[in-house]
């Protein structure tokens, strides 16, 4: 059974000086990454400007039905000195904000139009994969064994749920109001995105290191 929730750190608004500077833009975006120092580059991706989860949607197809027109141009740049991203982590876009999680346990929110910093949330363990967003909540899972639900505009913690000491290296899957993710202890868990309460939990008997996907009413996961 999950341990009771403990107090979790508050998000901190960043001063401009803390964000040493990158983006190509049109109407949507994808971010490429570099390490030490870390810089984000935004390029045109889709007409809605939204990419709220790993590979764009719960099916994780990475497909966008949109036409990209040249020329592309550099719109903004943002560099994070001393930060590193997990090799599988891709930033997500929701609510005109770009979200990226790092090995230092930081979740950053950036204005998608200007590249200006909005907030930073610090967890007690590294984030190895992408966050996900839906219903004005950003969800991220850490190696501290916790899943965090944060307000998309403020970064304020809405809930935190300790699931397992087996830790998380996958990205959350969000289907309607349900968050689904597997842990390296082999636990597959579904949470309510509103309050973090457990909807169901199952053990698959082997570590789950990859993100689950959803299609045709079914959840698919490898272990």
Image: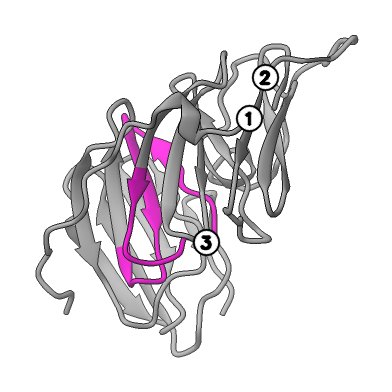
Q: Residue at x 32, y 82 (%)?
A: 165
Q: Quadrant of the N terminus?
A: bottom left
N-term mark: 3 or 2: 2
Query: Which label was assigned to residue 114?
Result: none
Q: Quadrant of the C terminus?
A: bottom right
Extreme-front residue of the structure: 17
Q: Residues within 10 Å of mark 1 (few under 14, many from 20)?
A: some
The location of residue 93, given as percent across then percent down, is: 54, 30
Residue 4, magenta (yes or no)? no
The location of residue 132, given as percent across then percent down, is: 45, 44
Q: Please state if 14 lies on the left or on the right of 83 as rendered.
A: left
Q: Residue at x 52, y 61 (%)?
A: 103
Q: Secondary structure at mark 2?
A: loop
Label 1 near label 2: C-beta < 8 Å? yes
Label 2 near label 3: C-beta < 8 Å? no
Q: Secondary structure at mark 3?
A: loop
Label 3 near label 1: C-beta < 8 Å? no
CA gap, disc 3 and disc 2: 23 Å
- What residue sits right under mark 1 in the picture? 21
Q: Secondary structure at mark 1?
A: loop
Residue range corresponding to the magenta coloring: 121-146
The location of residue 68, given as percent across then percent down, is: 83, 16
Query: Which label was assigned to residue 76?
Result: 2
Query: Which label was assigned to residue 103?
Result: 3
């Amino acid at each position: 059974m999950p341990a009771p929730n403990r107090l979790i750190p508050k998000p901190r608004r960043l001063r401009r000086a803390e964000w040493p500077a990158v983006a190509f833009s049109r109407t949507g975006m994808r971010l490429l990454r570099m390490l030490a120092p870390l810089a984000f580059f935004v390029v045109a991706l889709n007409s809605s400007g939204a990419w709220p989860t790993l590979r764009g949607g719960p099916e994780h197809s990475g497909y966008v039905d949109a036409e990209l027109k040249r020329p592309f141009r550099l719109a903004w740049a943002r560099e994070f000195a001393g930060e590193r991203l997990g090799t599988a982590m891709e930033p997500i876009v929701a609510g005109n904000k770009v979200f990226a999680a790092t090995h230092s346990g930081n979740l950053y929110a950036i204005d998608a139009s200007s590249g200006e910093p909005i907030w930073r949330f610090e967890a007690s363990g590294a984030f190895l994969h992408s966050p996900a967003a839906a219903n004005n909540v950003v969800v991220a899972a850490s190696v501290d064994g916790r899943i965090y639900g944060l307000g998309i505009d403020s970064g304020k913690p809405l809930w935190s749920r300790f699931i397992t000491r087996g830790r998380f290296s996958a990205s959350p899957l969000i289907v309607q109001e349900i968050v689904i993710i597997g842990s390296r202890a082999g636990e597959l868990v579904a949470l309510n995105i509103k309050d973090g309460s457990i909807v169901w939990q199952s053990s698959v008997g082997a570590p789950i290191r990859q993100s689950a996907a959803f299609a045709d009413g079914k959840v698919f996961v490898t272990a």
